[in-house]
DNA sequence: TGAGAAGTAACCATTGAAATTACAGCAGGT
DNA sequence: ACCTGCTGTAATTTCAATGGTTACTTCTCA
């Protein structure tokens, strides 16, 4: 099982907006062209990002702007805006284990803390990266191309 | 998106085998009763675990035994046995970004390392927990019940 | 007011998870 | 040698989520 491509698409969107914001008006069609998908898919993701106050999408005229300095938007912020994780739990349990079994009625108490710490390890690492890292990383890559 | 319940079910299975191995023959029906699911689901998971050499399932007579000391089976071992992650990559990309776009043709180079480190953070944390922790944890919980 | 763009509803196809039924194959007890 | 209980596994079904697509409404600016 994988985390849906919407997360990496969102990072792709931010990178595009950052790179092209001065040369082009960055619209959903423009982004769909770079990512090679459908504009409606992009709009749905843009909608999630703007509900999380990370970006502003101009109605009518079109175009995306980023609401905060790049260094103040982490991968985790993007992840949270995009992934509708149930209860915020990464790990899924089989519902309704048997309460008459000593193991069944205690399995949550046994596992919850440990699983949470695994999830936290991942999320904490996500907090270490920001869109500013994407900015500098992309600059380097583009220089190398020349 | 969540990691499938097969992982937590597998941990539940190990706990049951450990707790009940001396009192009962632990069969797929027995396990299905504790977890409250279908025996065939259990057998599929048992099949994955035995292919990974973590357990042995007795044909004919039935019953599950764990192949190694509990302290030598980590959550990560179980996770790897259970989750058929494509290429081992936790994060999914949208296929075929536009190679004519400077961002599109560099997005993988830009993100791959960072995403890998996030995945590694999770997997490393998984390696910190073993079935021995489940054994001691469950003992504590059962004592409290009395 | 018209053009371009976002918002969104309504579909559809595909995929994977989980459940279920059915049956063949195996091993131990009698 | 057979019966019983259990595993292995195929086939099917249901359900939800993802991703794609079309179509239409709404908005803003020139």
Image (tube, coloured by chain):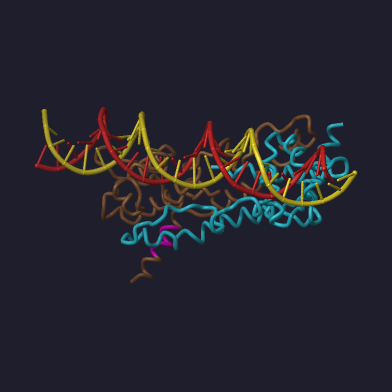
Chain colours: A cyan, B brown, C red, D yellow
Side (left or right) of A85 relative to A98: right
**Residue at 51% in and 54% down:** B129
**Residue at 56% in and 36% down:** B86
Rendered image quadrant of residue A74: bottom right
Side (left or right) of B11 relative to A34: left
Q: Give the magenta part as a residue range.
A: B134-139
Q: Where is residue A98 shown, x and y percent of the image?
A: 34, 58
Return the residue nearer the eye: A134 or A60.
A60
Return the residue nearer the eye: B124 or A69.
A69
Return the residue nearer the eye: D25 or B108.
D25
Q: Is residue C9 above or below residue A53?
A: above
Dominant secondary structure (helix, strand or loop) of the stretch shown in magenta = helix
Give the total number of marks visible in the rendering. 0
**Residue at 65% in and 33% down:** B95
Q: Is residue A23 above or below residue A106?
A: above
Q: Quadrant of the C terminus of chain B?
A: bottom left
Give yes or no for residue B137 being in the magenta stretch.
yes
Rendered image quadrant of residue B62: top left
Side (left or right) of D3 relative to B13: left
Return the residue nearer the eye: B39 or C25.
B39
Q: Where is residue B48 shown, x and y percent of the image?
A: 42, 39
Give yes or no for residue A89 being in the magenta stretch.
no
């Amino acid at each position: 099982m994988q985390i849906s491509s919407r997360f990496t698409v969102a990072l792709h969107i931010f990178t595009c907006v950052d790179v092209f914001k001065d040369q082009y008006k960055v619209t959903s069609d423009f982004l769909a062209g770079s990512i090679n998908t459908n504009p409606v898919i992009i709009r749905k993701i843009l909608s999630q990002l703007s509900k999380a106050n990370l970006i502003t999408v101009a109605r009518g005229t079109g175009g995306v702007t980023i609401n905060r300095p790049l260094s103040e938007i982490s991968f985790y912020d993007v992840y949270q805006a995009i992934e509708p994780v149930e209860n915020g739990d990464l790990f899924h349990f089989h519902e309704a284990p048997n309460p008459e079994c000593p193991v069944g009625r205690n399995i949550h108490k046994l596992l919850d803390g440990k699983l949470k710490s695994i999830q936290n390890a991942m999320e904490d690492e996500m907090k270490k990266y920001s869109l500013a890292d994407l900015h500098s990383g992309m600059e380097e890559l583009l220089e190398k191309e020349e």
